[in-house]
Image: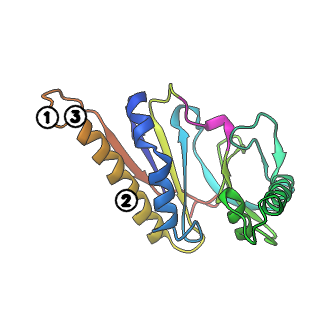
Amino acid sequence: MKAAVLSVEPDRLRLTMCCRKRTKLHDTLGQKRTAATIATHDLSLVKGPLYYDALPPTQVLLTPLGKKKEITAESLVKQLWEEAETLRKEKKRNTVSGIHKYLELVRGCPKYPCLLDKDGQVISFPPITNCDPTKISKSTKNIFIEVTSSTSQDVCKKVLDALLRQMLDIIKSEVEGQRSPAMRGRRAQRQTPRSPRGN
């Protein structure tokens, strides 16, 4: 599932896309990312149409969020596993935390899921990371929200609807009591992505 939230002011963007709210949805409705994963992008940087695909790990080329260099998904997962193991040993834990706990979801898979743009560039590698070229910044005005699932489109709809409701509640509470038409022109559009075969 995908949605576009248009005309978001930067100060509201910071509140709206609060990591805690997304994390809570990941943990609850998304069942710790095993049922659904949420990703956000700057819509002005997304080149549609988009399509989901599953490719061998060596063929998924991406620039992970916060990085400037392109890497294969295979190399990224290997690097993250090594980092997770080092942290686990350093902290003397039996388990890993953060993004590292999601690596198990792709471990051993012959193909990795990815969302690609019209040029075939990967913009998301769920449930591991978004990609840097479409990241949200302070100048972002329009947000593209992507919710993916390997189990059910229904769970994607529920997660997306819950996130959009939370975003609208935040914006509504900010303008409540004011006589300005601040909510006018705010739109949320939900779309269902197509596979490369048009299904």
Left or right for 18, reference 78? left
Q: Nearer the viewer, mark 2 or mark 3?
A: 3
Image quadrant containing the C terminus:
bottom right
Extent of the magenta region: 131-137
Q: According to the image, label 1 marks what residue?
A: 177
Dot 2 or dot 3: first in sequence order is: 2
- Mark 3 residue element: helix
- Mark 3: amino acid: Val
- Residue at position x 50%, y 48% in the image: 19
Q: Nearer the viewer, mark 2 or mark 1?
A: 1
Q: Position of residue 133 (x, y in %)?
A: 67, 35
How crowded is the residue under tag 2: few (<14 C-alpha within 10 Å), some, or many (20+)?
some
C-alpha gap between disc 3 and disc 1:
6 Å
C-alpha gap between disc 2 and disc 1:
24 Å
The relative height of residue 147 versus residue 93 in the rendered view (above or below) is above
Q: According to the image, label 3 marks what residue?
A: 175
- Mark 2: amino acid: Ala
How crowded is the residue under tag 3: few (<14 C-alpha within 10 Å), some, or many (20+)?
few
The relative height of residue 1 versus residue 105 in the rendered view (above or below) is above
Q: Nearer the viewer, residue 197 or 187?
A: 187
- Mark 2 residue element: helix
As drawn, the label of residue 162 is 2
